[in-house]
Amino acid sequence: MTVPPDIEAFEERAAIAEFDGGLSRADAEDVAAQAQGFANADRYWQWLADYVVLKRYP
C-alpha cells in the first residue's frame, strides 16, 4: 500500500455494513478493510500498527 488507509471511511463503511447490512462488527470491519484493498480487518489494523511503530509505510 502506498498511501495510508482512510480511517474515517473504514469506520463509516463498517458502521453501515453492521447496522444497515445486519453484519456482525467483525464481519463489517472485514468488508470495510476489503474496500480499501486489505484481505481482512486484522491485516488493516496490523498495517496501521506497523505504520505507527515504524513511522513510515510498512
Image (tube, rainbow, N blue to C red):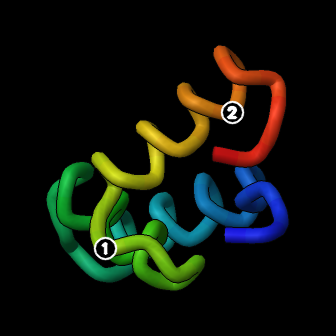
| Element type where label 1 sits in the image | loop
Q: Distance between the residues labelled 1 and 2?
A: 17 Å
Whether pointer 1 and pointer 2 mark residues with C-beta atoms closer than 8 Å, the reply is: no
Identify the residue at horizontal 79%, vertical 56% (top origin): 4
Q: Point out residue 56 in the picture as x, y percentages from the top left corner.
A: 81, 36
Identify the residue at horizontal 70%, vertical 22% (top origin): 54
* Res. 39 mark: 1
| Element type where label 2 sits in the image | helix
How many circles with numbers are drawn on the protein? 2
Viewer-closest of 8 and 46? 46
Mark in the foreground, 1 or 2: 2
Left or right side of 40 for 56: right
Looking at the rendered structure, the kind of residue marked 2 is Tyr
Viewer-closest of 20 and 44? 44
Looking at the rendered structure, the kind of residue marked 1 is Ala
Q: Point out residue 21 in the picture as x, y percentages from the top left corner.
A: 30, 81
Q: For mark 2, what is the residue?
A: 51
For the C terminus, the quadrant is top right
Assess disc 1: are there few (<14), some (14-19) or many (≥20) residues with their C-alpha within 10 Å of its C-alpha: few
Is 37 above or below relative to 56?
Answer: below
Identify the residue at horizontal 51%, vertical 81% (top origin): 37
Residue 17, by quadrant, is: bottom left
Residue 40, by quadrant, is: bottom left
